[in-house]
Image: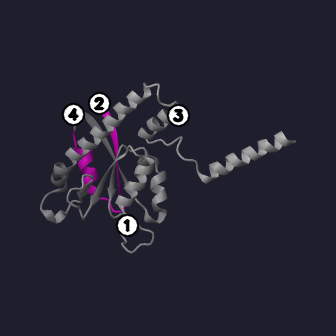
Amino acid sequence: MDTYNLVYVDDDPDSEIQKYFDKYFHSDSYEIVCQEKIFDPEKGYESLLEDKDITGANILLLDSHLFKNRTAQKKFTGEELMLVLKKFYPFIEIIIISQDEEEGDNYKISKYDREDGKSGVEYYSKIFPSLIDKAVSHLRLDQKLADKLKNNVVWDSVLIDKVINSLKGENVYDELTKTDIDNVIKAFKQIQNKLDS
């Protein structure tokens, strides 16, 4: 049975979500391992982009409002973070949890409201199974395509490695940082100096 890592990111986590995935969520065709990450606004978005649990996740649940203090400087939304994460980790399935769900959003769900009269388990039992099934379906399709890609000699091996590693949440070959580029330039200059002397 396939296992998929789900990471829930929030500055003020809804304990009902972790409880639902730990005790009540079930699928006959795959397993979900859920982990909760409490976002610290003081550390900024960089901490999320560098967190191995987040970058290695198959599915992310992101709170739309990642700041308890709505007047905090340098704040951003879960939707904005989703867009940035999709740039670097295009194969992570992302679901936004929001208090202001918009009609027709396939990737956005409403946060559980305790005043609704239902328990958190009842509420999430109606929402999560179909969303998680859809996310897993996308992940499986990507994996099948990656398997085909591996066996097709048309594609460059470095490109194939980039895609496969990205599917695994690893960006080994992705864009060089400024420091990496500076180090390469420095190494070339040293080689040039040795060749010139």
In space, the residues marked 3 and 1 are separated at their CA atoms by 39 Å
Point out the tag, 4 or 1, that comes first from the N-terminus. Answer: 4
Instruction: Give the secondary structure at mark 1.
Output: loop
In space, the residues marked 4 and 1 are separated at their CA atoms by 36 Å
The three-letter code of the residue at mark 1 reads Phe
- Residue 122 counted in the magenta span: no
Q: Nearer the viewer, mark 3 or mark 1?
A: 3
- Residue at the location (61% across, 53% down)? 178
Q: Position of residue 140 (x, y in %)?
A: 31, 35
Q: Nearer the viewer, mark 4 or mark 3?
A: 3
Examine the image and state in which quarter residue 110 appears: bottom left
Residue 40 visible in the shown view: yes
Res. 28 mark: 4
Query: Magenta residues, as a range?
Result: 1-26
Point out the tag, 2 or 3, that comes first from the N-terminus. Answer: 2
Residue with the mark numbered 2: 1
Res. 196 mark: none
- Residue at the location (36% across, 33% down)? 143
Q: Nearer the viewer, mark 2 or mark 3?
A: 3
- Residue at the location (76% across, 47% down)? 189
Circles 4 and 3: CB distance less than 8 Å? no
Residue with the mark numbered 3: 158
Q: Residues within 10 Å of mark 3 (few under 14, many from 20)?
A: few
Circles 4 and 1: CB distance less than 8 Å? no
Point out the tag, 3 or 1, that comes first from the N-terminus. Answer: 1
Res. 67 mark: 1
